[in-house]
Image (cartoon, rainbow, N blue to C red):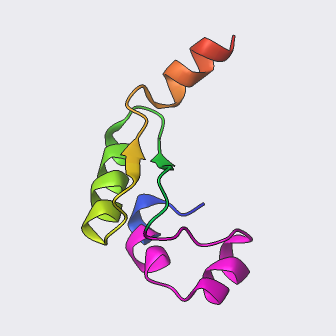
Amino acid sequence: MAGVSELESALQMEPAAFQALYSAEKPKLEDEHLIFFCQMGKRGLQATQLARSLGYTGARNYAGAYREWLEKES
């Protein structure tokens, strides 16, 4: 998916343009489970805050980041 630097424009795209660019359905404002994460947690939090500011009330940050997920999968 998009990096934090392009997230704002990505979330403001028309659904068809989003689908064409990312080969995925654009999240809906009312989606309850829009989870952001990154390697350490900072960018995931930034992405979550940005999504919420654009009206994505279900946006959440996986605070443990990728490292925690990876440790739990092992």
Question: Does 7 sit above or below residue 61?
Answer: below
Instruction: Inspect the magenta stretch and tell me whether residue 16 lies in it.
Output: yes
- Rendering quarter of residue 55: bottom left
Assign the C terminus to one quadrant of the image: top right
In x, y percent, where is residue 11? 45, 74
Instruction: Inspect the magenta stretch and tell me whether residue 23 lies in it.
Output: yes
Find the magenta span and give its range.
Answer: 7-29
Q: Which residue is found at the position 40% from the left and 31% from the top?
A: 40
Question: Does 53 sit above or below residue 14?
Answer: above
In x, y percent, where is residue 10? 49, 76
In x, y percent, where is residue 65? 45, 31
Left or right of residue 61: residue 26: right
Left or right of residue 19: residue 41: left
In x, y percent, where is residue 60? 39, 46
Question: Does 28 sit above or below residue 14?
Answer: above
Q: Which residue is found at the position 38% from the left and 73% from the top?
A: 8
Left or right of residue 44: residue 33: right
Assign the N terminus to one quadrant of the image: bottom right
Q: Which residue is found at the position 41% from the left and 60% from the top?
A: 4
Q: Which residue is found at the position 54% from the left and 63% from the top?
A: 2
Question: Total number of numbered labels?
Answer: 0
